[in-house]
Amino acid sequence: MNTTETARSQTWQRLGITAVLLLLLVGPIFGPLPAALGERLPLETAVPLLLLAFITAFTLILAVIFRLEHSPNLWAQLHDWGLGRPSRWSANLVGALVGLAWGFLLMGSVLQFDPDIDLGQINGLRLATAVLAALGALLEDLVGRGYLMNQMRRVNLSNWSQAALSALLFALYHTIWGFDPFAFVFSLIYGLILAGLFLWGKRSLTPVILAHSLALFISEPFATMSIFLAGG
């Protein structure tokens, strides 16, 4: 096997390992974990714990990725994946609009489960969960867009293939532990939007962060609450 074939094989292995880790470590956060927490804890405690579990899962996945990559410079690696890279202003603008729209949609979705909830209430829980969720989304985009899509480019997959595969994996680990067709399609569309913004923004994560982290910053803790309420 020549050097090029070896490099391609290693890249496919890293893609496979990352996909399995997402399904095994992140998938349960959208399935059995909220069910278990919801049975034992009040919602105000369960919500931040679920978000901390999400951050922990992606931190572990990133640690494995950095170990596989043997990167001597962490910040250079993150920049290579799109963090802080220049982007198109148009992609940033659309990302911000998507983030605002998606955030208010997520925030309003909890009303179908609890019509009496006060969406305008500002308290410590709301501020803490907003920060935790935005951080979790950033870590998720580093893996799901920045790392995976650039790895796919290294094995010469087209941009369309990169967007489709990353969105499919995004939808799978969000729904596979408690599969729901509507949730799967919903997640698939959102994953395609995030992947499209990454490509449109010249592989910068800025428009992706605006569309994803901003949405969760606006909608928490209600977005995470809906996971518990839907399960109940």
Image: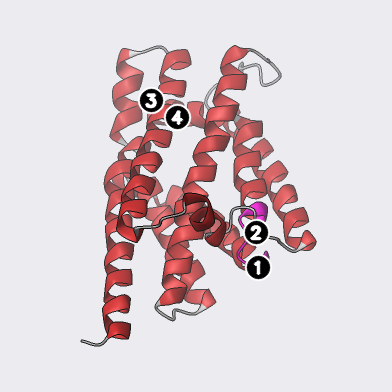
Q: Which x, y percent locates residue 23?
A: 30, 50
Relative to residue 153, is residue 210 depicted above or below? above
N-term mark: 2 or 1: 2
Q: CA distance from mark 3 to mark 1?
A: 42 Å
Q: CA distance from mark 2 to mark 3?
A: 42 Å
- The residue that mark 1 highlights is 202
* Mark 2 or 1: the one toward you: 2
Where's the C terminus, which quadrant? top left
Q: Is residue 169 magenta?
A: no
Q: Amino acid at mark 3?
A: Gly
N-term mark: 3 or 1: 1
N-term mark: 4 or 1: 4
Relative to residue 142, is residue 148 depicted above or below? below
Q: Is residue 119 left or right of residue 194?
A: right
Q: Amino acid at mark 2?
A: Arg
Q: Amino acid at mark 4?
A: Leu
Q: CA distance from mark 2 to mark 4?
A: 27 Å
Point out the stretch of residues depicted in magenta: 201-207
* Mark 4 or 1: the one toward you: 1
Disc assigned to residue 85: 2
* Mark 2 or 4: the one toward you: 2
Q: Residue furthest front?
A: 72
Whether label 4 touches label 3, CB < 8 Å: no
Crowding near the residue tagged with mark 4, few <14, some 14–19, many ≥20 C-alpha atoms within 10 Å:
many
Residue 219 found in image quarter: top right
Q: Residue at x 26, y 79 (%)?
A: 6
Name the element at disc 2. loop
- The residue that mark 4 highlights is 51
